[in-house]
Amino acid sequence: MANRTGALEQPAAARARAASLWGDAWRRLIRNRLAVVGGVIVVFLFFLLFFGPLVAPYPYQEQHLVELVENGNRPIGPFQGQFLFGTDDLGRDVLSRLLDGAQISMTVALVVQAVVLLIGLPIGAAAAWYGGRVDSFLMRFTDVMYAFPDLLFIILLSVTFRDTPIGGALDGVLMVFIAIGIVSWVGMARLVRGQLLSLKETEFVEAARAIGVSDFRIITRHLLPNALGPMIVAVTLGIPGAILAEATLAYLGIGAQPPRASWGKMVADGQQYLRGDPHLVIFPAIIIALALLSFTFLGDGLRDALDPKLKGKQ
């Protein structure tokens, strides 16, 4: 009876410890001011992902030609008339286009990290768990993928499939998702492998093996949940790279096709008016920098909060 009671108490104790660890991490996170500011901006950006078109003053592709002609066929400056951020050279509201660009960038952030997890997580887990030749083969494959220049590989994939159904899907954005995800999973695979190797020989794993728990169940129910903290940090810190890669591709004319308004494409289109109408470059450049910094601050805060070594130091 005592053994049965002890067996029942162990899961409850484990859940209590897990709740305490996450609670401590949350308290450390909210004490980090930069992380909190970054988190607020991130929440706002994800709000724009779902509700951006509803709060936009105009449809992102709508041209205000009458106002443009009255302005001498020049882009309307910010804070003039009904245009808070002005218009571009085609009479389209800059603020509305920035909100559409937020949808593209946040979708890239989510989909690319989903692709990273879909590829990197099973490869890293299989390499760590099975070891030997499986580990050697998968890690050499990972090294080969790591050797490719990321941006060049993304451009190659995007250009190769541009005229295919995949390349044209979602106004050309789907291929960008896939291309960026394919070159971004390497770090996740290495992280998962390293975390699982450190947990593989622990007592609770040996106990699970002894009672006949399947490999898949051990990995998904015991190993991966214990590696969740570093994975969350890696995903959060990987998002700025994905956003910057999408903006770079759009700047080069690859990715979202007109009339969609990618932030990088807005910078490219506005640079010819930089001297006379700098708002066409300044506003999208500021929002790109703001998005990158907010995810970086949040990721750094999560890394510090989820690091057990910092417990009691903050």
Image: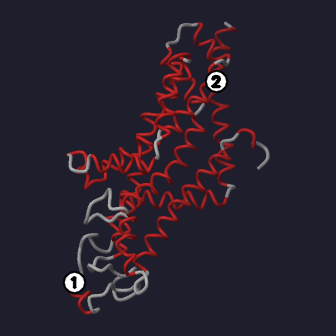
Q: Which mark is residue 90?
A: none
Q: Which residue does the numbered mark 1 point to in the structure image?
A: 65
Question: Label 1 sits on what residue type?
Answer: Leu
Query: Seen in the image, is 67 located left or right of residue 34?
Result: left
Q: Observer-nearest residue: 299 or 147?
A: 147
Closer to the chain start, of discs 1 and 2, is: 1
Residue 191, horizontal then vertical, whole percent: 58, 35
Horizontally, is 288 left or right of 94 in the view?
right
Q: Amino acid at mark 2?
A: Leu
Residue at the location (68% across, 8% down)?
3
Q: Secondary structure at mark 1?
A: helix
Q: CA distance from mark 1 to mark 2?
A: 63 Å
What percent of the width, then of the height, locates residue 212?
A: 53, 7
Residue 169 point in image, percent of width and height? 24, 49
Residue 242 against residue 101 in the figure, above or below: above
Q: How many marks?
A: 2
Figure quadrant of residue 264: bottom left
Q: Residue at x 46, y 57 (%)?
A: 244
Residue 199 badge: 2
In the structure shown, which secondary structural element does the residue marked by tag 2 occupy?
helix
- Circle 2 packing at 10 Å, graded few (<14), some (14-19), many (20+), is some
